[in-house]
Image: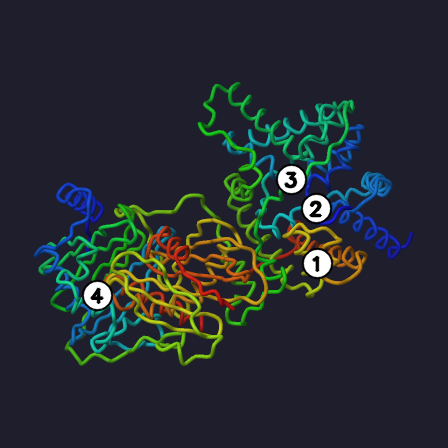
Amino acid sequence: MTNRQDAMKNAEYEVLLSRLMDGDLDEFSTQRLLKQIEVQPSLRTTWQRYHISRQAISGSGVSFAGLSIADRVREELEQHGSVPVRRGFWLQQIRPFAVAASVACFGVLVGIQWQQQTVQPVTSVAASAVPTVRSMPVMPIDAAGLQAIPASFGQSQVLRSPAPVPIEGLYQELARQRLELYSGHHAAAGALHTPATLMTGTLAKAEAEAVKR
Amino acid sequence: MSFNPAFRIVLIILVAVLGTGASAEPSCNDEDLRALSVLRKVLQSDHSTRFAARALVQTAVGSQQIVVTRGRPDTGTTYSVEIPDHSSDCDNLSHSLLASPSHACGVAQWYKFRMEQQALGADTVTVITALPKDVYRHGYQLVIDEKNDIVLRSTTFNGTNALENVELRALSLAAEDVPSQVSTPERMLRNTGNLAEDSPRGQADWRLGWAPAGFQQASVDRSEIAQAQTYTDGLSTFSIFVEHPKGEIRIGEGMVNRGATLAYTRGLRVNQKSILVSVVGEIPINTARMLVEGVEWDNNVQ
Amino acid sequence: MSGGSVTDEEADRLLVERAQKGDLRAFDLLVLKYQHRVLSVIRRFVKDADEAQDVAQESFIKAFNALGQFRGDSAFYTWIFRIATNTAKNHLVARARRTPVVDIDIDDAVLQDEGEQLRDLETPEEAIATQELEQVITRAVASLPDELRTALCLREFDGLSYEDIAAIMDCPIGTVRSRIFRGRETVDREVAAVMNGETSFAQ
């Protein structure tokens, strides 16, 4: 078979993988696909990657930890596995989907139109994807041992890294965008005008202007 | 300069609780009024000592140093943050609440103030702590150089946890005082004090149904994408932004905090229309949530 | 296929049936699909990274051997989750360690952000790689042509069926199928490059 034919055949099976992910495959095609996976192990890796992408898009988060578990399970079953005896029958039961959120997919559902300046470039959105923490991060007042980070002279940004507290991933990202979008206005209209929040407002104003630049 | 604010604040909180009992004080005392007097002076000083300093900005996720200046131009080679001047900002509501409150106690209705003098080398600084009397706002501690009207250290805290700490170090003062440069902070949104003049689409179709005691509306603004209202109690501030996205959005809520500043965003369905409400301010998350839940919508929300 | 959302349960049905007949390849695909979630659940009980992976492996082996008893009363993942939690607890008991005071309600387990738990297991290098991977995926999705991006997001994010997506996008189901695949394929090229270490992501 030529390379072109190989590529076409490979693509054909990848289509089947894609449909299998979505429950769109019939039994015969499923069997055909499983048979092909035996002789084309790359399909297995593609399946794994498709699900990694799905996790990321759906907002579940991805991780490199645990990628080898399937290999170990397969190895052990091939050496020692037994054929399970099937009893009973399949009962369809509709369960609610776990509602997750996705930055990449925000705005797709029935077309939200945001003005250009309100939509952060993908690079900056992705760059702010800091690991999330469950509890509100707090810093004891007597915070000994904090290392001073020298100012980056010449850089245009003042960064006080946001500490995300996940309520829902998509809305967390929306909140982050709104913070960037509106903190300058809030500073000008409010925070700059009280002695308690003067410094907070000053920093926010500077950050907002840096983002604009 | 180093302090031990943790111990101090815990002590102050204990004294406040034990001294006043569980319920909020209906009145204020001399200490409150003296503290307010110092704060007014700092904010509205008509002589501003020029200075430059390295500021250590500490938040829960880390710290950073930046250069902070007042009255000194950006040299271009270093990044500096200029503190705006407020000496001529007489009609700002926050200033009014501090300077000319309608109630004798002013801001002290909502905060218990503690004031003490501390030695700092050969000088003396004033440490003012504002403890909130309810759970709807943060507390603040300011270390003030009264002679030069400089806030040397500004801490925003909630309970005994600091949310943000900005401390000036390596302060260098200008050789002589010069008249401060007027620098009016620029708002991003257009100020629409009279919304009746706007198009029907732009008229406010919502109002704040609840806010913590003492907060008053400071401004109303709008842009192409949002209507905004800012509120202040004289020390704390928050702004609410209402957007009407085209199309439907999934309902939900999310929050991030950057130092002392919180951004809380909530997607709602009102009269079968999607609305995005955001609160940005130096307030606790539960206050932000309650603000959004208390928004009253007109029936003709578009 | 019914309209509305497509649950994992429906998507897994054929694979589970084949696995119940002893098809290791089908079970392998299920393990590949769920290994992260199972590990994440186990991680709540077993803090040690290596031990957690061992327990995850043991859980899947147990699940395969017990497949004959799975009657489809619940979703396959729910069933695996129960096996995993029991295996984890037994592991801790065997190690004479205290189990967490608060048990995990299954709905909480389904809804948790599994990525977050797993990040605790990652080495610093893996953590950086994970962040880069997420960035790459986000960028790749955002760069897709509108119709591919819409189809893919309606499927992955909203869990809509091909029929519903076809109705929303006003196109035949075959077109939906093709768009979703082309979207996945495009994103997958970027993911493959990351996982094969072929790309650097200095910005």
Residue A124 showing in the rendered view: yes
Q: In which quarter of the image is residue A48?
A: top right
Q: Viewer-proximal residue, C85 or B149? A: C85
Q: What residue type is disc 1 on?
A: Ala
Q: Mark 2 lies on which chain?
A: C
Q: Quadrant of residue A113?
A: bottom right
Under circle 4, the secondary element is: strand
Residue B183, horizontal then vertical, whole percent: 28, 78
Residue A189: x and y, percent? 33, 70
Which residue has dot 1 on it?
C151
Q: Distance between the residues labelled 3 and 2?
A: 10 Å
C194 lies above or below C51? below
Q: Give the structural element (helix, strand or loop) at label 2.
A: loop
Q: Which of pointers 3 and 4 indicates the residue nearer the eye?
A: 3
Residue bearing mark 2: C6
Q: Which numbered dot is residue B171? A: 4
